[in-house]
Image (cartoon, grey):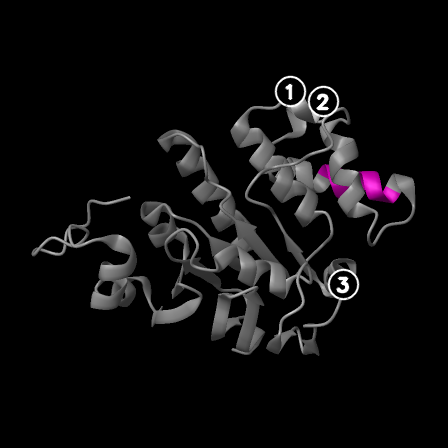
Amino acid sequence: MTNALVIKNLNKKFGGLHAVNDVSFSVRENETLALIGPNGAGKTTAFNLIMGFHRPDSGSVNALGHEIANLRPHQVCELGMARTFQVAKPFGAMSVLENVMTGAFLRQPNTNRAKEVARESINFLGLSAKENFAARDLTTIDQRRLEMARALATQPKILLLDEVMAGLNPSEVDQAVELIKKLSSRGLTIVIVEHLMRAIMAVAKYMVVLDHGQKIAEGSPDEVIKNPEVIRAYLGSGYVKPQGETHHD
C-alpha cells in the first residue's frame, strides 16, 4: 500500500516557541491515523502547515505525489485534501444545502451539479431532513456533520478532522465514530486530531503522538497506549491498569 501523505522534518516557530519541531510521519492510502497529544502539543499547527494555512520554516509535505508545503489552502484543496476545524464556523444565515454547495463548487461550477454533489454529501452525513435549516439553528453534533459534509463535497482523497467530537455527549460521540468509519469505507485517507481515547481506539489504525511540538511515539493504538513516554506526557499513570483494562478518556 502506498503513502497518501508524507511529512518529513517539519518545523515551525512562532517567536521563540518551536510549535512543530522536526516532525516526520506518513499516512497510508485508505487508513485512519490519529494525531494525539496534550493541549499545546502542536497538533493543530501541524494541520495548518499541511493544509497551507501556515508556511513551514523547513521540511516537506508531500500529498498524493505532490509537494505542497508552499501552496495556499485553496491549491491544497484542489489537489484533493480537505479539513474541518476545531470550532465549527458555518455560514450561519445560509441553509445547510447552501453551506455544503460552497464546498461542491470547487469541482462543480454548474449550480445544478453542485447541488447534486452537495445533497449526496448531506445524505451521507445524515442531514437530509435538515438541508433547508439555517446552519446557525443546528445542534452541535449536526454542525459537526455539516463541517464534514462541506469538506466531503470538495471530493477529497485525504480528509483532516480536527476535534470533531469536542463538546459531544457519549451518544453523539458514538454517532461521530460511526460517521468516521463510514467516511473511511468510502476509500478516504483520514488524519484525525482528537482527545477522546475511546473514540480514537475505535477508528484509528495508527497513532502519532506529539508533545511540545516533537513526535514522542508512533505505532498501533495498543503499542502507543503502553508507551511509558506517552503515559507520562499525555495519558497519565492511571490510564493502563495492570490487567490492561483501560478506563481513561
Check disc 1 and report the residue beneath it. 137
Classify residue 206 by image quadrant.
Answer: bottom left
* Residue 227 seen in render: no
Find numbered disc 1 in the image and state the secondary structure of the residue it sits on: helix
Find numbered disc 2 in the image and state the secondary structure of the residue it sits on: loop
Q: Residue at x 67, y 48 (%)?
A: 151
Q: What percent of the width, then of the height, locates residue 123?
A: 65, 36
Q: Earlier in the sequence, mark 1 or mark 3?
A: 3
Instruction: Count the labels in the image.
Output: 3
Q: What percent of the width, then of the height, locates residue 55?
A: 67, 67
Question: In the depicted view, which residue is nearer to us: 230 or 220?
Answer: 230
* Badge 3: residue crowd in 10 Å (few <14, some 14–19, many ≥20): some
Identify the amino acid type marked 1. Answer: Asp
Q: Residue 72 bears which disc, if any?
A: 3
Vertical placement of residue 151 versus 90, above or below: below
Tag 2 near tag 3, CB within 8 Å: no
Quarter of the picture containing the C terminus is top left
Identify the amino acid type marked 3. Answer: Arg
Tag 1 near tag 3, CB within 8 Å: no
Q: Nearer the viewer, mark 2 or mark 3?
A: 3
Q: Which residues are magenta?
A: 113-119
Is 88 left, or right, of 215 in this rendering? right
Question: In the depicted view, which residue is nearer to us: 89 or 38?
Answer: 38
Q: Residue 177 bears which disc, if any?
A: none
